[in-house]
Image (cartoon, coloured by chain):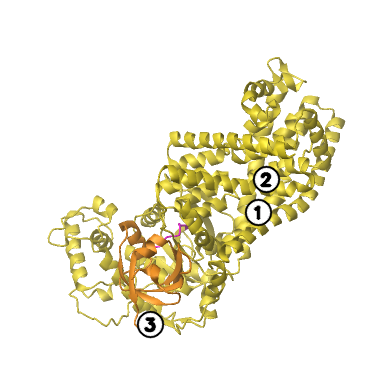
Chain colours: A yellow, B orange
Amino acid sequence: MSGKVINVGFIGNPNCGKTTLFNAYTGANLKVANWPGVTVEKKEGYTTYKGQEFKLIDLPGIYSLTSYTMEEKVSRECIMSDEVDVIVDVVDASCLERNLYLTLQLIELGKPVVLALNMMDIVEERGMEIDLHRLPEMLGIPAIPVSARKRSGLEILMHAVAHHKEYAKPGPFIHHHSDKTGHKHDHHSEYAMVYNDEIEDKIDAIIEQFRKKYPDMENMRWHAIKTLEQDETVTEQFPVDMSGIADRSYEKDIINQKYDFIEEVIEETLVNKNEKAEKTEHVDRYMTSKWLGLPIFLVIMALVFFLTFTVGDWLKGYFETGLDLLTGAVSAGLEAAGTSPMLNSLLVDGIISGVGGILTFLPNIFILFLALAFLEDSGYMARVAFVMDDIMSHLGLSGRAFLPMLLGFGCSVPAVMASRALEHRKDRLKTILVTPFMSCSARLPIYVLFSSMFFGEHAMLACYSMYVLGIVVAILTAYIISKIDGSKAEHALLIELPEYKAPNARTIAVYVWEKVKDYLTKAGTVIFLASIIMWVLLNFGPTGYVTDIAESFGSIIGKAIVPFFHPLGLGYWQIVVALISGIAAKEVVVSSCSVLFGIQNITTSHGMDSFVATLGAMGFGAANAYSLMVFCLLYVPCTATIATIHREVGSKKLTCGIVLFQLAVAWVVSFIAYHIVGLIL
Amino acid sequence: MKLKEGKNNHTYVVEKIQIELNLERRLEALGLTEGSQITVLNNDKKGAMTVKFRGTRFALGRRIADNIFVKEAAA
């Protein structure tokens, strides 16, 4: 077998294990991009089986193929285009009933479909069995049991894909419907899903019109069904005269009859359907309980941050030792080679201390993302939406809006993108506005550095307080806005609570690796560049190369803006320049400080000692440090986040408004924090 | 009666869904149609509740739960 690449579209309900299966084929070698025009993630990867190459496309998780949401539209367009030759419909075999609805819609599309029955292990655990002989008979498509976790059935699935492509005609169907009506066309031998006579007659009448008006149309039956459902896209593209055929939408009838057929399928193929009291419902009695739900959530989050700081800091020690050794070796090497002091300075003070300083935070970030991946993969995240719904609705938001905020602890970019799951634009805007206040992992290096320098044994408390403050500011902002715009609590939460499962090592590894890779890439690109730009700004002035930093361009810029920061206890031009550079990426604040104050390896203990001494001589104490941390927590998000916000809200004016608002909030809260901490200490 | 008035671990039959079209259609696509069965799992809180229909668990906000009308399923 050889020849052309076969394009395979992976589609399925959310939480059916589609991405796990996709990753089992492609590993982490993915190309992730966005669908043209919209910010829905598009993943592509390749796999080969017996010399045949397959291009796999991971489509967004959806429940149906209507065109109400962006995800559904994207999936539908992609499947219908030439981009997809064969559809692999991944279903969660343990909830076959709900998953088959999308399957029936896919079959109607008329392209080759292969059913991948995932999570068969759960089906077995529950003492159920699926009749793998009867199921393909009724649906007319191959059904392959797979386990993404155990990596079984993977080759058979690709084998079926390669073969089924050649036999695109579905069937044979063996049905024994109870209401055999003897429709004149006997569609039961042609299609899996046959509607009642009333609807079939209408479908025939519409097809009749299509034949005259659009003779080249592919799959007229599907277009006719969509016309009966009054689907906007289809009726606009192929308008027909519906008088005498239908005077209303038959969507409800069509849905009901599909579910009736699904019931028939389940009845015949699911053996031993006695559901035991499932583990999930048992666990949920505690996780979603009225009294315990919230405390359990808070304990879990406290544990996540505790691990991030303690275990992360412990590992960080080793990274720092390594960095120290590297700087020493490079300095010695350069001196021995007799290179110019300017180049030495660029390499050691600019690049190594800038980029290296950021790399030492890798362990903290690794553990934070590991914990978030664990929560997501285990199925707990959806419970958080339920637990937080009551509190969130006081803020005029749905419990679902809490998920983007929670993801914000990792990185603001995916968090802002996750707000797309919210239905109303107003909710989305509000969530996008407050999500950057949730302290992302890039801000962690700033807290760790300044709190360990100025707060000694209370350093961890100071770090924690940033996270709490971020949440409080986000909640207060949402509350005040909902009071102003008078939006009432929507109470329209609708979210699936998936089965709890032991998190899969491979899925977690892929998730964490992607984030770590992002972080490393950032260190190698944005931070690398920012370090060089900072070095240039600080070593060159109007007079050319300067040895006194106070005569540099950086100093001139910083000094011009200092008055604005004076009331916050941040009226030092070096700090101001560091903050401006932090807009590139928040970690840059740390690397800039190291360049600005000329301190090598700022994150190591002797680096910190000399930094504290330098700052202390300038009159910069604990209150100033706290104010700086607060300002970093709340001010303008990084360029990547601003770009994402712009894409999501689709307006330059709104984006500017959001950014300015965040800057204003940062100023006010830092001002208050500076004075309060100053009074206490 | 409203779904929100349902008791834990009781199963009901959906009589009517009175909510804006978009939400109604989402619910229908999930399989919550008139005449289908729905089981209340956890209705202890004032706000959201958890339910199970067509083999899947869902959390429903209060406004949705208030606008789905059900009757007790024949035992």
Q: Is residue A282 left or right of residue A429?
A: right
On the same chain, marks 3 and 2? The answer is yes
Earlier sequence position, callout 3 versus callout 2: 3
Location of mark 1 (residue):
A368
- Chain letter of disc 2 in the image: A
Residue A450 x %, y %: 73, 40
Is residue A574 in view? yes
Say which amino acid is labelled 1: Leu
Q: Is residue A57 left or right of residue A239?
A: right
| CB atoms of marks 2 and 1 within 8 Å | yes
Q: Give A397 or A373, whichever is nearer the viewer.
A: A397
Disc 3 or disc 1, which is closer to the eye?
1
- As displayed, is residue A197 above or below residue A27? below
What's the distance in space between the residues labelled 3 and 2, CA to CA? 56 Å
Q: Residue at x 82, y 37 (%)?
A: A330
In reply to whether residue A450 is colored magenta, the answer given is no
Hey, what amino acid is under mark 2?
A: Leu
Q: Amino acid at mark 3?
A: Glu
- First to last magenta residue range: A56-63
SS under mark 2: helix
x and y percentages locating residue A321 in the rendered image: 82, 46
Q: What residue did someone put label 2 on?
A: A444
* Position above or below: A606 against A304: above
User: What number is the disc on residue A239?
Assistant: none
Residue on which the image places disc 3: A268
Comparing A606 with A178, the one in front is A606
Alpha carbons under labels 3 and 1: distance apart: 47 Å
Q: Between tags 3 and 2, which lies in front?
A: 2
Instruction: For the C terminus of chain A, give its image quadrant.
Output: top right
A563 or A81: which is nearer to us?
A: A563
